[in-house]
Image: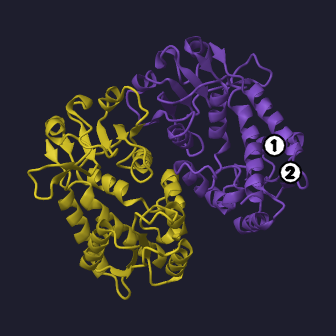
Chain colours: A purple, B yellow
Amino acid sequence: MEIIDGNQIAATIIAELKAEVSMIAGRKPCIALVRVGEDPASVSYVRKKEKTAEEIGVTSRIILPPITISQAELFTILDDLNRDPTVDGILVQSPLPKHIDEVAVFRRVAPEKDVDGFNTISLGKVAQEDPSGFVACTPAGIMELLARSGVDLKGKHVVVLGRSLIVGKPIALLALQKKAGANATVTVCHSATTNLSAITRQADVLVAAIGRAEFVTADMVKPGVVVVDVGINRVPDASKKAGYRLTGDVNFSQVAPLCAKITPVPGGVGPMTVAMLMQNTVKAFRQKAAP
Amino acid sequence: MEIIDGNQIAATIIAELKAEVSMIAGRKPCIALVRVGEDPASVSYVRKKEKTAEEIGVTSRIILPPITISQAELFTILDDLNRDPTVDGILVQSPLPKHIDEVAVFRRVAPEKDVDGFNTISLGKVAQEDPSGFVACTPAGIMELLARSGVDLKGKHVVVLGRSLIVGKPIALLALQKKAGANATVTVCHSATTNLSAITRQADVLVAAIGRAEFVTADMVKPGVVVVDVGINRVPDASKKAGYRLTGDVNFSQVAPLCAKITPVPGGVGPMTVAMLMQNTVKAFRQKAAP
């Protein structure tokens, strides 16, 4: 059994991007990070993105509208960034306050700067297998983890647990693509699936993205499976100073011994997302430079 | 075993649309049908669409550029139609001549007039479960056939044979949607799938869309399955005046006896596509009227 080390793979990608960006003469790629309000998790995520950008040599521009900003005012900010030739990528940190329509905001970001991959066009391009599109960071990170761990999906049966717009559906579409590394048979399961473990036991690669702590147990997998655990759940744990521990959607201690490879939580998919955001930003820069 | 009668269901939908359109005071919905060149199949398809529009009371505007039209000139035609407030839907008949980029043309059609559902945004909206989008006519027709035959997909295992952009992927995304009638567990198989019949035999509903004559045989299905046959293949047949007969992707004589329900070819999915195009046109008209 091999543990897929997301921290190490992400560090490799960040180093590659740093080398690539250092070769760029003149203006460096620039990402605009828009954070509405002071949600502590958002503050921490945006800080992490800013830090990673700095490490790579990507310029970041931080925009911090107050929690009371109207949707129209937020649109104006985005329209300005969309028009700004010195901005290559735009990320609007979610969650947004309730008075703002998140999907409408994601659609407002220009498709060619949509490094978060949440614009409708970006998702459509994933379905169309159009490589000019931006793949959302979590599914893009999963594909990279698999590729860099030597897992070729061709002809494999990939079972995806969860049909969310940001993980389940795009990873299913990516695994289906007719290209090297992909080409998998794909099944998507979810809350309405009957006889779930009979399906998950068929998986050569199981992607768990349902947000239920330690949901996947030993009886749900076949020996030799590759497991990608996308869940990040807090479970109460009196032995921890914080009073909780982080756990994935997979019961790691039960399932890991059966696996050929498995991603841990934390340290699996999580660290990949910021690396993918930066990869998308450099790609946006390149696509603008060579239209 | 019940044969799902696509001709009859399509006729019902057309009658419903006719009644609906007759209630519209003033300007009626209008579809622009753009046919490049004189390909005989295209001539016949466009004529069928024009005739059905007339039957319903939808205005059609036929635009017949020559086969030599440049992509830029075709874009100009589309831009004019996009701007024209008296045009609700635009269909560009495929195939287009080789010097024109078909995907680029489909993207040029304004999303709010994309009654064919081939625009990247339309496909993205299917993934996003956004009901304002237009579903491509074949997958939309399949969902209608199932719904009007009393097949509720909830919790069922739908196996899709084929991952094309116009059938396989959208029907998979539709069957996955979290809404009444859908909510299926979905598996997509294709040319790289290994152990295919072990998967198709699990299907409660099997959608065959691979374009291989009579590919699905009795050993590939379980008794009680619902089969939707999307294939339209010509096979040589000396006993026919035309020298060929039309057949689906399913070996009907073998498979039908095992089915709870099955769509025939011809007379199954085929007749639904024009009905769905008209439904989309009326929807485009309504969405423009009530923005």
Question: CA–CA distance between discs 1 and 2?
Answer: 9 Å
- Please provide percent x and percent y for residue B138: 34, 56
* Image position of A236 (left or right of B167): right
Q: Which label number is shown at residue A101?
A: none
* Image position of A226 (left or right of A198): right
- Of all residues shown, which one is farthest toward the left? B239
Give the structural element (helix, strand or loop) at label 2: strand
Asked if the residue under mark 2 is in contact with the one under mark 1, i.e. CB atoms within 8 Å, the reply is yes
Q: Is residue B98 above or below residue B169?
A: below
Q: Subunit of mark 1?
A: A
Image point 26% across, 31% down: which residue?
B220
- Please provide percent x and percent y for residue A68: 77, 61
Q: Look at label 1 and name its amino acid.
A: Lys
Give the structural element (helix, strand or loop) at label 1: helix
- Please provide percent x and percent y for residue A236: 68, 24
Q: Nearer the viewer, residue A51 or A59?
A: A59
Q: Look at label 2 and name its amino acid.
A: Ser
Image point 24% across, 47% down: which residue?
B248
Q: Which residue is mark 2?
A: A60
Q: Which residue is mark 1?
A: A49
- Of all residues shown, which one is farthest toward the right? A26
